[in-house]
Image (tube, rainbow, N blue to C red):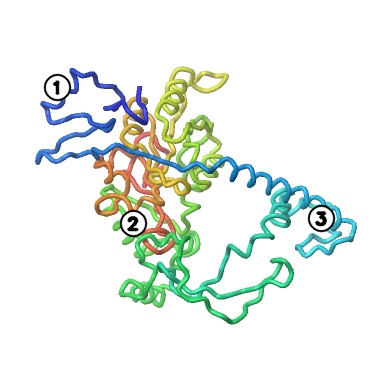
Amino acid sequence: MANSGGGAVCNGKLPNHKKQSDSSQNGNCTKNGIVKEAQQNGKPHFYDKPIVESFEEAPLHVMVFTYMGYGIGTLFGYLRDFLRNWGIEKCNAAVEREEQKDFVPLYQNFENFYTRNLYMRIRDNWNRPICSAPGPLFDVMERVSDDYNWTFRFTGRIIKDVINMGSYNFLGLAAKYDESMKTVKDVLEEYGVGVASTRHEMGTLNKHEDLEDLVAKFLNVEAAMVFGMGFATNSMNIPALVGKGCLILSDELNHASLVLGARLSGATIRIFKHNNMQSLEKLLRDAIIYGQPRTRRAWKKILILVEGVYSMEGSIVHLPQIVALKKKYKAYLYIDEAHSIGSVGPTGRGVVEFFGMDPGDVDVFMGTFTKSFGASGGYIAGRKVREGLLVSI
């Protein structure tokens, strides 16, 4: 059985010591739990270093005081809402008109409550307006509030050279005006600002086709499709790949766009522990043995959803083991490389290149242009025709 720490997996099987010695003579070997194959020139094809993940845990007193702060803030929030309802305290938030009270509310109850009573207290730490390129250092426009963060006003002062700790501009491509910006300017002048909108509105242009060919060439795959929004690339395309009667196996730390796409698809969703190969294989084995609930029919498709680099934790997917399990159980693999494309691998081609694997081992590549490439939008890439999937690229 595959695992995330020690045992190596080769096409879904654990090699014994005899097989290891035999494979070493043939140019293949296993080291540190990662399969390593030798190319004709003798250089390792697979990434041959152990994947070591270390996550610092918050001290107990920090967690206790954090939850206490949330609890106290929530209690006072309900108290203040009570005072606002009775007109004792002025309500500065946007409210629906009395004539519309019988309509479906525009806002979910707790979401609105959280924004009004908790986030409002600390919102001056977010959405800070900047007035320079988003490089390692940028300039921030100073603002103050006279009504406890309900509204802000600018003082006119510019805070220079603030350290940028929150940018997705991984490679610095959006930090200065250069030749690439001139190209963008020329295209906008020729095609208009709608060139990046949905193709239902503007149609497919030669620039779309040029970009798709370039993405496919960069990823070493047969074809690619580009979209105007990275989040929607996941949430709108997963439902095109799977539906009712299909099974999605999703990593517990997947991005919200993957989660939304899975829910919109109508497929059955099961969660496996983060980068835990035992958890994933158990779900795969059960899916094969038991099939769909009640009917016990075989699943139409089994799709594994993972990320290349997980955005909140910074951990990297254990791709060789997942590919081995995917091949063993005849599943499909969908990998979100929003945070790994352009920043991982010797030439920035993502986790497949990082591990030295064949791009054909991954059924669907997804990525965005909003991080490393300093632009907007996303892409889906892979083979032109993938047997068993609903759509062709």
Closer to viewer: mark 1 or mark 2: 1
As drawn, 22 above or below 241: above
Tell me which numbered mark, 1 or 2, is placed earlier along the sequence. 1
User: Tag 1: residue type?
Assistant: Asp
Q: Residues within 10 Å of mark 3 (few under 14, many from 20)?
A: some
Which residue has dot 1 on it? 22
Tell me which numbered mark, 3 or 1, is placed earlier along the sequence. 1
Residue 56 horizontal/vertical position (percent): 46, 43
Task: Give 45 or 384, whichever is nearer the viewer.
Answer: 45
SS under mark 2: helix
The residue located at (38%, 30%) in the rendering is: 331
The residue located at (55%, 71%) in the rendering is: 129
The CA span between labels 3 and 1 is: 73 Å
Which residue has dot 2 on it? 212
SS under mark 1: helix
Task: Give 271 or 164, whichever is nearer the viewer.
Answer: 164
